[in-house]
Image: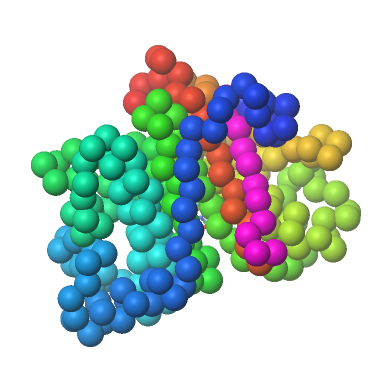
Amino acid sequence: MTPGASTLPNAAALEKPYRLALCKPEEAEAVAAAVEGAAPQEALSASELGTAAGLKTPKRLREWIAARLAAKRLLGWRLQQAGLYLKPSDITLGNREDGMPFARLPGGRVIGDGTLSLSHSAGWGAAAVCEPWALVGVDLETIAPRAASFLELMAHESEWAPWMLADPVEQTRLWTLKEAVAKLLGTGLSVGFWDIRLVLSGEDRRLELHGAAEARWAALGRPIIHFDSRAEDDARILSVAYAARPQEAPL
Ligand SMILES: CC(C)(COP(=O)(O)OP(=O)(O)OC[C@H]1O[C@@H](n2cnc3c(N)ncnc32)[C@H](O)[C@@H]1OP(=O)(O)O)[C@@H](O)C(=O)NCCC(=O)NCCS
């Protein structure tokens, strides 16, 4: 099953319906230090402070905050376009039972159900917010060589070429693309590594879904999934998967 293709041939078919934001570790550090010291801060809502108190490690707290700062920046901008001026602490980011993030606004309005996606890596936070008619998934990973044993587990033979063994950028790119698609689908951990395949096709890749990933894609109405990757400061790869929701999708 081939639900999408690499961005190059499809770029013209769908104008990118998402915006991205990154948050640096030092920005999250200031908020984390205030939270740990029970000092006033203007980034998190009371409900988020309750969740923050349950996070197990300082690293998790900082990355969790970094992703939320990135998301609130995007949401704040988008709401301003609609004439709604909110402080970051007026917006509460939560997670559905399956882990998918959502934002709750004062008055109870919820933004989510596939239009908001978060990621964190090495202290950095990333967020993507898309138009209501679209779906988005984002993944940020630090560029690093992966062990051959992990690569064998992660990459199906159709995704693999011997030159990738010496190419940490492509290894990281492949991993982030899989995770971005898993987040768009909302499946997270429930799919196997080979259920989401970015099959090598010349210098390009095309998306194939199998098993649990294909079943979820079918339930979403078989949207055409596009994807993009970019290197940030030669240190991180940021990948995004995005799609227009089919009219008849049971969302
Ligand atoms: C979602 C997932 C795929 C990514 O986790 P990760 O790469 O470890 O961590 P990231 O920082 O990039 O992303 C975590 C964010 O994903 C989001 N997320 C979690 N479950 C999600 C789901 N079912 N759908 C969409 N987004 C989800 C959350 O917002 C979470 O951040 P938060 O807890 O601060 O809100 C997770 O299921 C996971 O742990 N995967 C491990 C590897 C795996 O099996 N990948 C499958 C690829 S084929």
Where is residue 192? Give x, y as percent.
58, 46
- Vertical relation: 110 (above or below) 168: above
Where is residue 4? Give x, y as percent.
64, 28
Q: Tell me the quarter of the picture where residue 213 sits.
A: top right
Q: Main secondary structure of the magenta part?
A: strand
Q: Foreground residue, 149 or 235?
A: 235
**Quadrant location of the N terminus in the rendered image:** top right
Q: How is the image coloured?
A: rainbow
Q: Is residue 132 left or right of residue 38?
A: right
Q: Is residue 225 magenta?
A: yes
Q: Tell me the quarter of the picture where residue 214 sits.
A: top right
Where is residue 35? Give x, y as percent.
25, 77
Q: Evaluate whether residue 9 shows in this view.
A: yes
Residue at 48 percent of width and 68 percent of height: 24
Residue at 62 percent of width and 21 percent of height: 13
- Residue at the extreme bottom of the image, as rendered: 37
- Residue at the extreme right of the image, as rendered: 162
Give, as a single range, the part of the protein colored magenta: 224-234
Where is residue 250? Give x, y as percent.
36, 21
Q: Is residue 40 left or right of residue 31?
A: left
Residue at 18 percent of width and 81 percent of height: 38
